[in-house]
Amino acid sequence: MPKLQSKLPNVGNSIFTVMSRMAVNHGAINLSQGFPDFPVSDELIELISSAMRSGKNQYAPMAGLPELRVSVSSLIQRRYGYAPDPDLEVTVTAGATEALFASIMAIVQPDDEVLLFDPGYDSYAPAIRMAGGIPIHLKLKYPTYTIDWEEVGESITPKTRLIIINSPHNPTGSVLSNLDLQLLEDLALANELYVLSDEVYEHIVFDGKLHESVLRSPLLRERSIAVSSFGKTFHATGWKVGYLVAPESLSTEIRKVHQFLAFSVHTPSQVGLASFLKNPENYSSLSKMYQRKRDFFLQGIQSSRFRPIPCRGTYFQLIDYSAIDQRSDVEMATFMTQELGLASIPISVFYSDQTDHKVLRFCFAKEEETLSKAADILCKI
Ligand code: PMP
Ligand code: GLN
């Protein structure tokens, strides 16, 4: 056998795989990997299964089913006041993960620098490295998990090509404000940067706030890729259907990568989603539903010694345990899963370097019964 040189030598199984497996092995309540435990809409399932029964089972067009791209464009028009061209600017992808990977591959050249933030979602840095780029990790300010724009400005060099943002933010539940987007716009324009905006939780924003999409701003959207995921919006993370929106020149290049990475995406899902998306009620109640779950969970742990960190969006609640235990977050998450029957994600795995914050992430996209049981365990610690 020739010796294989790893392109990702420091990558093992993701923490989501590790913790979900540990939860199953120990019969623990699984609030680790982010996925809902309640059902997908019957109507959507019926739309997709009837598409299968009526023979919509062959390849979809490479860029996505035209009806779905039109529905996505109308959704964006309704939410952000701008209708991207469905033919040229909307591309359906195999989940947000593929959209992110294809975008990074299309934009990043060898030795380009890409700015991203810790803690952050795990797929960005490996994609940058696979493209030959250099991830430049900046830190969100602790404990508000906000961006230090001055530091961003100071970190830009002639090699900086791209900045990756994520709002609402996994794992912290923080959201970017209108001012954040303005500062981003100034920096992106002044330094000729592209912006990759991971907006998979765009419909899950709490306390009456608006989601600040890059698509709202005419100047930002000229240089941005916005990424979303039907898995998050319709509680169907296993379907892996998402999309990206980008100006024509960027979309053309990203589609070249998508063409050889996935080529096209599950046809019956696209048929069903195209028609389900036409009714805004199917996604506009999401914030309210998840806010109820967040508040239910917070109420449940109110009498515990854990300290929740405010969650403004997503379905993740961070909890600080520094008043209770001094072991590391990985040790604490492992102990709680194996000995107490409750699985979470240690926050340190979302950092590129060592961090000693005593913080765990709990997914509250769960039935109240599951959340109650989890809260009871936390109250006993
Ligand atoms: N970005 C973020 C911030 C996420 O939380 C997820 C969900 N795992 C993804 C991207 C990937 O989404 P998908 O499952 O549609 O690939
Ligand atoms: N996005 C999910 C989370 O943050 C997990 C996705 C995955 O397992 N790759 O928990």
Image (cartoon, rainbow, N blue to C red):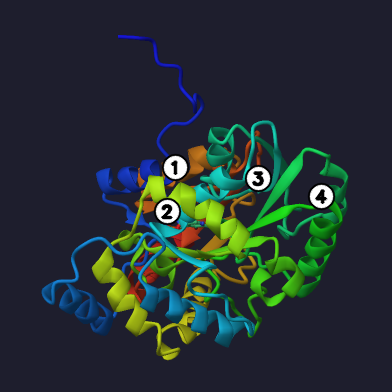
Q: Are marks 3 and 4 in contact (CB under 8 Å)?
A: no
Are the residues tagged 3 and 2 within 8 Å (C-beta)?
A: no
Q: Identify the residue at image location x=44%, y=66%.
A: 375
Mark 2: few, some, or many residues within 10 Å (few <14, many ≥20)? Answer: many
**Considering the numbered disc 2 on the image, is that residue within a helix, a strand or a loop?**
loop
Q: Which residue is mark 1?
A: 15
Disc tally is 4
**Whole-percent x and y of residue 287?**
52, 80
Front-most of 207 and 310?
207
Q: Give SS at disc 4.
A: helix
- Give the vertical position of 210 relative to 63 (above or below): below
Q: Judging from the image, what secondary structure is the residue with disc 1 in? A: helix
| Amino acid type assigned to the residue bearing label 2 in the image | Ser
Which residue: 81% across, 50% down?
Answer: 152
**What's the amino acid at mark 1?**
Ile
Residue 128 visible within the image? yes
Question: N-terminal of the two: label 1 or label 4?
Answer: 1
Please tell me which of labels 3 and 4 falls first in the chain: 4
- Residue 310 lies in what quarter of the image? bottom right
Residue beneath label 2, please?
Answer: 32
For label 2, being within 8 Å of ligand 2 is answered yes
**Mark 4 Cβ inside 8 Å of ligand 1:** no
Up-down: is 8 above or below 83? above
